[in-house]
Image (cartoon, helix red, strand yellow):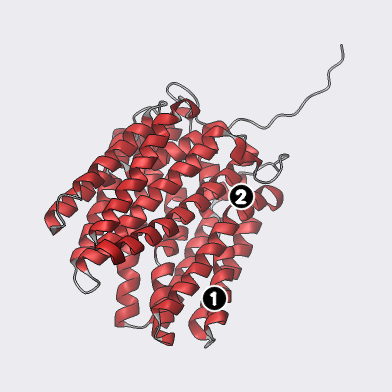
Amino acid sequence: MAGYGDLLRTRGVARIIAAQLAARFPNGMTSLAVLLHIEHVTGSYGAAGLVLAATSIGQAIAGPITSRWMGRWGMRRVLTLTLTVCAIAITLLALVALPVPGYMALGLVAGLSTPPVQSAVRTIYPKMVSSRQLTPLFSLDASLQEIIWIVAPVVITFVATQIGTVEALLLIVAILLAGGAWFILSPEVGRVRIPRSRRGFGRVLAKPAVLLATVSGFLLIAACSAVEAGVVATFGHGGAEAGLVLAVFSIGSLAGGLSFGHIPIGRWAMARRMAIVTGGLLLTLVSLNVWWLGGSLFVAGIGIAPALAVIFAITSASVRFSETAEAYGWIGTGQLIGAAAGSAVAGFLIDGVGPQGAYVAALGFAAIGALVAVACVRGFPDLRGRDASPIPDTEPVPTIT
């Protein structure tokens, strides 16, 4: 833990971590608030699901596009534009009465304009710390983001159910504007300039490490989504057990990320960390007792943040600096698709065989992720003793001979 203390004392690191967490905090609130609000005004969970689907599609499409724009127009311009449009779309969603297609259109706009804070901050990190500190910083970032998924759903559910769904959406807008402004005005965002990429859009996926990071993120988040669906199906919406078990799941991830952050990342790092997730999910099949399930998911959670740290580090080390934002945008899109796929597969299995089916789905996604990491081990870069910073952008320099 002493290493994290040194890291946080590095100039600007603590500030940028706090700012990006505040800017991304609405990510843990928006889906639930939209679900509750649309169901409240239409009386239909089906309609709410359509609006959520439109929002998720927008986010998935926008991820690599808005991230790439930051290399063309600058981080502050893109972040300010997307932040403003997203805030307006969510405000209209809260205050204007529309038919379901109208709500879907606003959800799509909100998704398309989601500020690419995650891509921006992970592009900034290599410029703030030494190469020795970069891997622990990615691990710390992956661990602390669990705070969003522990606290945000609790806060927004309380506001939506005890005060009102309109107020819940307006609270999201307020946090989005305040957190986004804090991040955009951070000195580091102004100091770091992403060079314009000379490669075609999407070409970064041809790099094996980026493709593996995208596929691994898809499978990991699909497993997590299936777990969330399974926990809700197991304990229902009315009791506290579901929230507590999911909190334990996130706490396991937080503990794992902080514990493993100092370990160098070799070719087998992803396989080992996905094996921990798979092993914990295998234990969930023994019993759905709240104590057993909580313990099993804590074990599974220990591998999640460390696996995400591998994804971020191998991406950073494998691309040119001008390509990092777009690469992280594709990874984010993969994770969003994984979340949708995990929820969908788990939902079908819950309807067919009961809550146990969701944990089988989660185990299947995690096991495939572990197998991919083993089968493609040579595609993962060995970062032990190696700088994980992006490859510098260079160009031919004419010389006189």
Say few, some or many: other residues with alpha carbon within 10 Å of mark 2 (under 14 / 14 to 19 / 20 or more). few
Viewer-proximal residue among 310 and 356? 356
- The residue at which mark 2 appears reads as 190
- The residue at which mark 1 appears reads as 104
Q: Is residue 33 above or below residue 253?
A: below
Residue at screen point 68% across, 46% down: 201
Viewer-proximal residue among 8 and 168? 168
- Residue 63 is situated, as x and y percent measured from the top left of the image, at 57, 54
Say few, some or many: other residues with alpha carbon within 10 Å of mark 1 (under 14 / 14 to 19 / 20 or more). many
Q: Which one is earlier in the sequence, the residue at label 1 or at label 2?
A: 1
Amino acid at dot 1: Met
- Residue 226 is situated, as x and y percent measured from the top left of the image, at 33, 56
Q: In this view, does 6 lie above or below 115?
A: above
Residue 312 visible in the current orientation: yes
Closer to the camera: disc 1 or disc 2?
1
Residue 150 visible in the current orientation: no
Separation of residues labelled 1 and 2 (CA atoms): 35 Å
Residue at screen point 29% across, 42% down: 277
Q: Quadrant of residue 114?
A: bottom right
Q: Is mark 1 on a helix, strand or loop?
A: helix
